[in-house]
Amino acid sequence: MNRLLLCLTGLIFILSSGCGQKAEQPSDNTLTIAMIAKSSTNPVFLSARTGAEAAAKELAAQHGIDIVIDWRTPPTEDGQVQAQRIAQAVNEGADVVLISCSDAAKVTGAINDAVDRGVSVMTFDSDAPDSRRFAFYGVDDIKTGQLVMEELARVMDGKGQVAILAGNQNAPNLRKRVEGVMQSAEQYADISIVGTFYHIETPQDAAAEVVRVNNAYPEINGWAMVGGWALFTQTLLTDLDPDKMKIVSVDALPPELPYVEQDIVPVLWAQPTYLWGYESVRLIIDKVHLNKEVPVINPMELVRVSKDNLGDWARQLRDWGFTDVPEMYLQMDSKQ
């Protein structure tokens, strides 16, 4: 009888271990969010991570749970690696995946597989609209491209030769921004687009591409940058003449501020990239922990940064936790 009871106990233990469940079930008091951005070397995604961790800390205290941000971002853009990391996160017990998609086609299957296994998925910055993610948080990319071109046309007095700096050719959000630039450019008879130029999304590669294209097309006198990669390095501060070349770009992180001060980039359209993480985690908690209805599309509003509000924007970056904001910009008065 004792042997029979022992065998039954063992059988019950095996059955209760959760056949077909995630590999490591977290405790009921812990929510693990696997965060997979495009590239861990891109400062915009590091700021998103800071925002996610800040939201996790605040909401954990508010709701009496542990919220873990499990950073699984590859060092460089690779949609296939992102897909692999989604699967790994699910196998290792993640409750939610938060991803900015380098290539929607390559990650959609992995997103759907995660959802099939009971893991909620949310996208930010760059969406996978055909997947079963529950929500997206980011800017309207076509509108973003239009705003970039409209500002560039204004500072170029409505005439000139423009190049588009476009980052990863496979990123759906960047393709839409380029589309927006092209749509807006059609409204200006005296502006022509020389070409769209893609590159690896590192500051060095982006800046090198700008220099290469300028040498190949000396008639260019304007750049529409749908991402701020080339401005994350100081290289172009000395390579570009603001009297001959104007740039309008997306993003406004601390390394880009000198370009505004020196009039090389009169306008930056800032994505509040810190909020990619902060707002996404807030929406995840609403959906997964509080069982609230969450909109599928959650728009992020751009902020126009120029010399007029450079000081205010610098102080906002500092308040979001950026430690590399130059003191001179923090001391600037607002001209608005």
Image (spheres, rainbow, N blue to C red):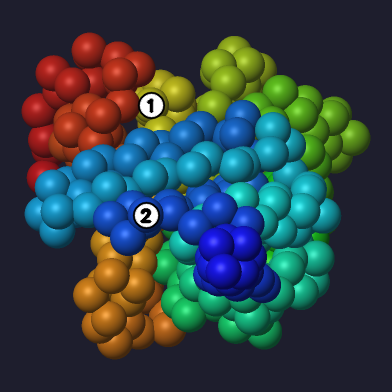
Residue located at (42% from left, 83% from top): 296
Q: Nearer the viewer, residue 336 or 249?
A: 249
Q: Is residue 306 left or right of residue 160?
A: left
Q: Nearer the viewer, residue 264 or 155?
A: 264
Residue located at (45% from left, 29% from top): 256
Residue located at (28% from left, 70% from top): 289
Residue ID for mark 2: 27
**x and y, in percent, of residue 204 in the image:** 71, 23
Residue located at (32% from left, 76% from top): 287
Number of labelled discs? 2
Which mark is in front, 1 or 2?
Answer: 2
Q: Nearer the viewer, residue 78 or 202?
A: 78
Q: Amino acid at mark 1?
A: Pro
Residue ID for mark 1: 254
Question: What secondary structure is marked by label 1?
Answer: helix
Q: Vertically, is 186 above or below 220?
A: below
Q: Residue furthest front?
A: 1
Q: Vertically, is 266 above or below 146?
A: above
**x and y, in percent, of residue 2 in the image:** 55, 62
Q: Earlier in the sequence, mark 1 or mark 2?
A: 2
**Crowdedness near tag 1: few (<14), some (14–19) or many (≥20) residues, C-alpha within 10 Å:** many
Measured in 3D between alpha carbons, the distance from the residue under mark 1 to the one under mark 2, in whole angstroms, is 39 Å
Q: Quadrant of the N terminus?
A: bottom right
One can see residue 99 in this view: no
**Crowdedness near tag 2: few (<14), some (14–19) or many (≥20) residues, C-alpha within 10 Å:** few
**x and y, in percent, of residue 125 in the image:** 51, 60
**x and y, in percent, of residue 33 in the image:** 45, 54
Q: Amino acid at mark 2?
A: Ser
Q: Quadrant of residue 102?
A: bottom right
